[in-house]
Image (cartoon, rainbow, N blue to C red):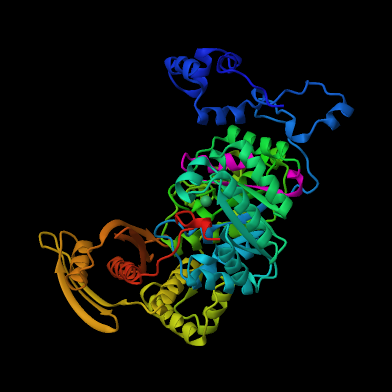
């Protein structure tokens, strides 16, 4: 029943040459060319999404009920307006699927240790995230191990592993997920012409078969299966319909429409999702999901359009929007938008929002990716109280300016929790309240000793200090190749700064000296005079962990070498000590050559079935 319109008829239906040029943002001369040469394929794909009425025979506006029932669902045309009245479904709950530990961790420099992943997973469970994508089991031994441990520890959230569409990856995911009380296998394959041809080197028919076989194989291990057509928003809609219908028939229960490269625009992305749901006969057998990237700053907007226009009921997101390039959809923004504007969205969310800020701080501390102060919800200036404005007027009539309450997302003024006289029990209890589990009594003792050292230097200890101290403690236990021992450093106006650093290198203690144009430069020259890493220095950032001049400084240093990017972190009341620790921690990460497979980048991909 497809309409066979000529190029001229299509251009005329769009309102003529100049209107068509305006629609595509190109010169009228190019449209005149199309009248001779035909419309390029990619432009036709776009038109199929935004003007499906040009390609599918239209159903008359007022269809009698009986006649409408006879029209196959995939042939019903959609309105050209993106603002459809929203459908109501039985369960209007929005599922929050967090992929901080998988897609977030893929961000160069954000890789995490197993212990760090566990701490984040526990925080996500505390926040009552519905699904935690804990990693990509086939990526490395480390990832496999982390997923398996998390699957055994987390009880309240579904645990998910990504896998490419091949038996080996799926079996590996299933093995890692075995201990989980609720598990999901998330398999994906690229469906866009570009990715199929250039990356997979597979024909559409091969991709179609591979997708079906993958879901069929995954069903052997669990009933909860998610399928993603990678680069979905740039895929041909007819092909997508064919693949998705087939995988739902095989038992996929969630269909995740991925905007892998952040190319989507809210109305178009939402409409494309809606068109898919309308054209695929068994689309109601699956929950639809959105997965957006923030390359054009529209990840949250695209996701919400996918929900409101497209009818998606799952949003994939990460804490702080962590992710490759410009990142993923930010969990905190989705959750607070849907909650604050319930009048509009009318959806339930199971998240405990008071855990949002602790989660944000934890992720930024572990990855070294600082949160910009003006970031929505979790930025230091997001609420008036956090930016230090304590005028009486604002406090009395807060809702004149604030649409959310700071305490609802977990902001609380820094509280002095412990001091110099606090004992080991109080310290241990506070660790438990913060959800920090140290593996052994020896680790608790070591952390307590460091706490005492810190309390000698700084009279008031805040939660943030304890978190920094514990991260530091866990870092130093990770068989660090380079470890900080001591630093002596002099700066004086008119003199060249000098530094003397003592550190251990593969268990052997070395002392080195250096000068530089500033103290940081001097420290790095001193270390490099021994190490000679040849790493490129990419970023140096320093943050006061809490307020006041007594605050500890937390330093992040990013280094790059041979295409690898790592972040090192260090915290101390002396910012030069923090800098030295951060630099040694970055060097250690460069030294450990654990390479990980990136699910989206390998060429052999799904072909290795
Ligand atoms: Zn992604």
Q: Quadrant of residue 233?
A: top right
The outermost residue toward the right is: 66
Q: Is residue 211 magenta?
A: no
Q: Quadrant of residue 399?
A: top right
Would residue 127 be found to the left or right of residue 88 on screen?
left
Could you say which is closer to the camera, residue 587 or residue 555? 587
Q: Residue 388: where, in percent of width, then height?
A: 46, 51
Q: Magenta segment range?
A: 282-306
Q: Residue 454: where, in percent of width, then height?
A: 39, 75
Name the image quarter holding the N terminus: top right
Could you say which is closer to the camera, residue 574 or residue 554? 554
Q: Quadrant of residue 242?
A: top right
Q: Compared to 480, does 157 lie above or below?
A: above
Could you say which is closer to the camera, residue 435 or residue 331? 331
Q: Residue at x 76, y 23 (%)?
A: 59
Would residue 253 be found to the left or right of residue 108 on screen?
right
Q: Compared to 145, does 604 lie above or below?
A: above
Q: Residue 84: where, in percent of width, then height?
A: 70, 30
Would residue 224 be found to the left or right of residue 578 on screen?
right
The outermost residue toward the bottom is: 442
């Amino acid at each position: 029943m497809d309409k066979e319109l000529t190029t001229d008829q299509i251009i005329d239906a769009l309102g003529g040459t100049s209107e068509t040029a305006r629609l595509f943002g190109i010169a009228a001369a190019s449209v005149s060319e199309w009248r001779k040469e035909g419309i390029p394929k990619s432009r036709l794909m776009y038109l199929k999404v935004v003007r499906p009425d040009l390609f599918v025979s239209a159903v008359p506006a007022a269809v009698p009920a009986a006649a409408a029932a006879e029209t196959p669902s995939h042939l019903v045309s959609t309105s050209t307006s993106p603002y459809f009245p929203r459908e109501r479904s039985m369960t209007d709950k929005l599922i929050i699927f967090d992929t901080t530990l998988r897609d977030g961790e893929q961000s160069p420099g954000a890789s995490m240790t197993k212990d760090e992943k566990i701490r984040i997973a526990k925080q996500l469970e505390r926040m009552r995230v519905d699904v935690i994508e804990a990693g990509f089991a086939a990526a490395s031994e480390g990832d496999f191990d982390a997923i398996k441990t998390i699957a055994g520890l987390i009880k309240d959230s579904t645990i998910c592993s990504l896998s490419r569409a091949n038996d080996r990856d799926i079996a590996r995911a299933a093995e890692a997920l075995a201990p989980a009380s609720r598990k999901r296998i998330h398999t994906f394959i690229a469906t866009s012409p570009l990715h199929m041809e250039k990356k997979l080197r597979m024909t559409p028919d091969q991709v179609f078969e591979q997708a079906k076989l993958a879901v069929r194989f995954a069903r052997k291990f669990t009933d909860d299966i998610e399928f993603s057509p990678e680069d979905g928003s740039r895929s041909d809609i007819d092909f997508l319909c064919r693949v998705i219908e087939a995988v739902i028939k095989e038992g996929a229960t969630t269909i995740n429409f991925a905007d892998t490269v952040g190319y989507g625009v809210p109305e178009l992305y939402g409409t494309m999702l809606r068109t898919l749901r309308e054209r695929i006969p068994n689309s109601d057998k699956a929950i639809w999901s959105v997965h957006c990237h923030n390359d054009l700053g529209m990840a949250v907007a695209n996701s919400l359009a996918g929900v409101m226009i497209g009818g998606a009921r799952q949003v994939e997101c990460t804490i702080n929007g962590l992710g490759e390039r410009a990142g993923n959809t930010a969990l905190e923004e989705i959750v607070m938008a849907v909650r604050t504007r319930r009048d509009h969205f009318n959806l339930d969310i199971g998240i405990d929002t008071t855990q949002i800020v602790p989660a944000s701080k934890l992720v930024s501390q572990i990855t070294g990716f600082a949160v910009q102060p003006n970031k929505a919800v979790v930025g230091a200036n997001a609420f008036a109280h956090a930016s230090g404005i304590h005028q009486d007027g604002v406090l009395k009539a807060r809702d004149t300016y604030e649409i959310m309450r700071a305490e609802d997302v977990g902001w609380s003024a820094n509280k002095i929790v412990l001091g110099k006289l606090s004992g080991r029990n109080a310290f241990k209890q506070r660790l438990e309240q913060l959800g920090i589990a140290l593996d052994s009594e020896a680790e608790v003792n070591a952390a307590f000793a460091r706490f005492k050292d810190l309390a000698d230097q700084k009279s008031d200890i805040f939660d943030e200090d304890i978190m920094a101290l514990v991260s530091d403690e866990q870092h130093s236990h990770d068989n660090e190749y380079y470890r900080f021992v001591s630093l002596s450093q002099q700066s004086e106006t008119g003199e060249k700064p000098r530094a003397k650093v003592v550190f251990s290198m593969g268990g052997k203690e070395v002392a080195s000296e250096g000068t530089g144009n500033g103290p940081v430069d001097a420290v790095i020259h001193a270390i490099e005079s021994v190490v000679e890493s040849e790493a490129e220095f990419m970023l140096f950032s320093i943050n006061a962990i809490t307020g006041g001049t007594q605050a500890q400084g937390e330093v992040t240093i990013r280094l790059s070498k041979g295409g690898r990017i790592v972040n090192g972190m260090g915290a101390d009341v002396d910012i030069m000590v923090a800098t030295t620790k951060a630099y040694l921690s970055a060097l250690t990460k460069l030294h450990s050559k654990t390479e990980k497979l990136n699910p989206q980048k390998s060429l052999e991909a799904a072909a290795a079935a």
